[in-house]
Amino acid sequence: LKMNYLFTACDKLKNSRRKIVDNCCNFLFNMLSIWSFLLLVLFKSTTVVISDKNPSNKWALLVAGSNGWYNYRHQADICHAYQILHKHGIPDSNIVVMMYDDIAYNEENKLSGKIINHPDGVDVYHNDVNVKNFMNILLGKEKEMQHIGSGKVIKSGPNDHIFINFVDHGGSGILCFPEGEMTIGELNKTLTEMHRLKKYGQMLIYIEACESGSMFKNVLPNNIKIYATTAANARESSYACYFSEELETYLGDCYSVNWMENSDKELLWLETVGEQYKIVKFETNTSHVSEFGDRSVSKDYLSDFQGEEIFLKFGSFLFAQLLKPQQQQQQQHQQNRRPPNVHLDAVSSRDVPLEILKRKINKNGYESDAARQNLHSLLLKRKYVDEFINQMVGEISKHFHLNHEAMLTKRVADVMDFDCHSKLVHHFSRNCFSFSKNAYALKYAYVLTNLCNTGIPVNEILIRMEESCKTAKMYSNIV
């Protein structure tokens, strides 16, 4: 018994010593963390003081370029982006939100009045979400925006930082709005004009759209302090995710969800733009996230574009986050090294309408028959677009002695003639199939690029295109 008592006493002593050692290690680790944090605060404060000689403001333009319930995710993405900027201290006066706003009170919204992460108020509604207003807002043209939405514009100067987040449908060299579309030439002309007028110091652009890489590939200069990342490269679809069984629609897009969830959890003044790009590229395994433009901007901290309120209120963070046991810190470190975030319900953005209808059919019940009819109708309309494009390209190819198959299948060329491309895009959209009303037609936008790159005068191509479009059935809502 005495020996057992002695062994027990020894074990207790060892455990007691071990706890003392562990506590000492945790104390030293926490003190080191605090001092490291304070040094970072000092560094950040010094940087702010130095930069005060050339003070800068932060501005943001957030655009959801679509409407309709099946596009719910686009407006939800922009609402989430707004919340991130608002939470991190960017004033509402410096955030312009362009959104059609037909989701919150949509008859299909079972959570009437609510959008996931929706802002307290948006600025531009319905048909005012268009290319002209987008450009006027960016260029700070207050007079042109009077009596439109809130009338807010980006009144930026040569030292200011601008963040643009655009979410919608896209095609080769095209981004869509609820009314009309913006071409690669029009976007880059606006950006070049902003640079000429010294409307910014640095600019960060995030674009969520199919083939979004085509808007910048071999076009965006690498020396004008504009850095852009896109959800997809120049030839592929972006992907939707987070299907809601309750709302029967997709709540987000993979690229957007990944950058926003990263911004939600990280200290923006400690993570660079380039680091977020690498994280999002790694996490988004459904498409090839791409980067373009001036890589020097990627070395800036996210707080320079998305706000830094967490830094300004670091006191609570100091006690809530840094005074954690070493073991918890290690667990967090392991979590940050997790494999890519696999969205099991991810689907190509172009297949979203089909997938929504298929899910309704699988539910059976009252809505199943209607969904089956809608799916059949949609597939017929898509087939009609396929056949029309084939016929139009065939007629144009025959007239100009072009290779029909090459015009219809070649997808590697960049836009060489911006003027020709813009004219063909807008003419096709007005007279054949509106890209903003028939998102499926964007699948064939590359054909217009191919036609322009032949060198044939654009007016001659327009004449042949108009002949083909005269006989087309003017469908709408071919999604």
Image: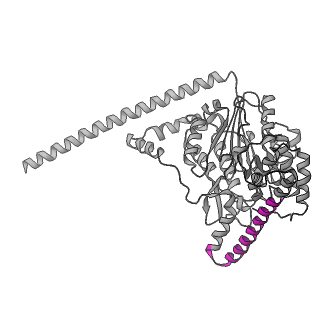
Name the foreground residue: 92 vs 360.
360
Whether 390 is drawn above or below 297: the answer is below
Residue 16: within the magenta? no
Report x, y in % for residue 332.
45, 44
Q: Is residue 132 visible?
A: no
Residue at image point 60% right, 24% down: 47
Image: magenta residue range? 362-391
- Majority secondary structure of the magenta segment? helix
Residue at image point 81% right, 62% down: 388
Report x, y in % for residue 123.
78, 48
Number of numbered callouts drawn: 0
Name the foreground residue: 343 vs 398.
398
Residue at image point 69% right, 44% down: 213
Q: Quadrant of residue 186?
A: top right
Whether 195 is drawn above or below 176: the answer is above
Residue 382: within the magenta? yes
Q: Quadrant of residue 326?
A: top left
Residue at image point 56% right, 50% down: 285
Q: Quadrant of the C terminus?
A: bottom right
- Position of residue 303 in the picture relative to residue 420 (left or right): left
- Position of residue 332 in the picture relative to residue 201 (left or right): left
Name the foreground residue: 84 vs 368.
368
